[in-house]
Image: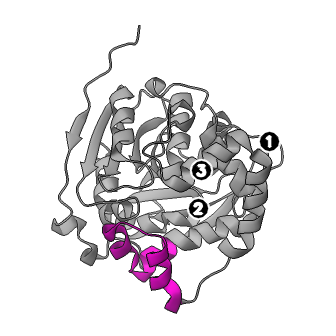
Amino acid sequence: MRKATAPVRNYTVDYRLEACNTSDNSYPRSKMSSETAVQLPDGAVVAFEEYGDPNGVPVIFCHGWPSSRIMARLTDEPARELGIRVISPDRPGISASSLRPDRKLIDWPPVVERIAERIGIGEFRMLAISGGAPYAYATAVAMPRRVRSIAIVGGAPPMAELVDAEGLLPLYSRMLALYRTQPRLLRRLFYLARPVLSLRPPMRFRPLLLKMLMLRPCDAESLRDGEAFEAIFESQRRAWRGSAEGVMVDAQIYAQPWGFAIEDVRVPVRLWHGKEDRAFSVRLAEQVAKRLPNCEARFVDDAGHYSLPIRHMREILQDLICDADTSP
């Protein structure tokens, strides 16, 4: 018999509020970061960068897929204003981090622990966007005394548990089907895609690219800003430039069982999800929220997969550290 869980608190945020409007330039303008790396016991290297306030409340960032550590550029300016130190690692095989071809999701928490030791932090919070969600959940399960809370923004659900692919972006549902039926073909497609997806398109082609992606209007509008576009798409290009194998290994994680139940995540979770999200429907997010024992869910009007973190990053970060002592 399934254990009863705490009720999910739901909030609807009006994106037209001044704090959420795209005109407030709430994403980073300075691109200020500190880049470094940590070596793991097996000799592998994990690269990471820091954003925001170097003396602030520590938050470990989990990038999406396909993406890399520089996706955390979205946090830089609001993190500095709020007194938050954002640590953003590349996952193994992504960009400058060593490939670990046989890794599983549950291999990630020891990496986070190593990074925390390297930079000298004890307790921390986590912020995960899109495909970073399973990694934040896994760390919270493995390190409940050190992870104070996590924020999930447009997060991926446990796809291996889905009965069907309804609610997923069509590309994701096709990839899942190929992974299960024709994995060699899927691998070949990754290698064929890499030369194209590693390219940096000229600025004059950006409007055409946004149109080809068939984005929600709110997402397309948010990505017309050059800084936001760079944070999202340059992070993707860096992932592909690293290796097709690294991107593919990262993708396989989503099709496999996580190794724990979502009900095992006991730390406080702030789950943010746009009602216009095409990658993972709001229905899937609602199902995850109901299963989390300690969750506050914010389902945001007129926000999609990209516009939610772009427009609302300051709110997301402020909410994440609301119980933190930020006094000097």
- Cα separation, mark 3 vs mark 2, equals 26 Å
Quarter location, residue 201: bottom right
The amino acid pointed to by label 3 is: Arg
What residue does disc 2 label?
69
Horizontal placement of 99 versus 122: left or right?
right
The vertical placement of 240 against 281, above or below, is below
Residue at (42, 45) in percent of width and height:
167
Crowdedness of circle 1 by 10 Å Cα count: few (<14), some, many (20+)? Answer: few
Prevalent SS, magenta region:
helix
Residue nearest the observer in this picture, 205 or 126: 205
Q: Where is residue 14? Give x, y as percent.
A: 17, 59
Residue lying furthest bottom: 204
Quarter location, residue 37: bottom right
Numbered-mark total: 3
**Sequence order check, earlier mark of 2 and 1:** 1
Q: Quadrant of the N terminus?
A: top left
Horizontal placement of 97 versus 129: left or right?
right
The amino acid pointed to by label 1 is: Pro
What residue does disc 3 label?
174
Q: Closer to the observer: label 2 or label 1?
A: 2
Q: Closer to the observer: label 3 or label 1?
A: 3
Element under label 3?
helix
Q: Which residues are magenta?
A: 203-231
The amino acid pointed to by label 2 is: Arg
What residue does disc 1 label?
41
Crowdedness of circle 2 by 10 Å Cα count: few (<14), some, many (20+)? Answer: many
Residue at (37, 66) in percent of width and height:
310
Give the colouring mode of the picture: one colour
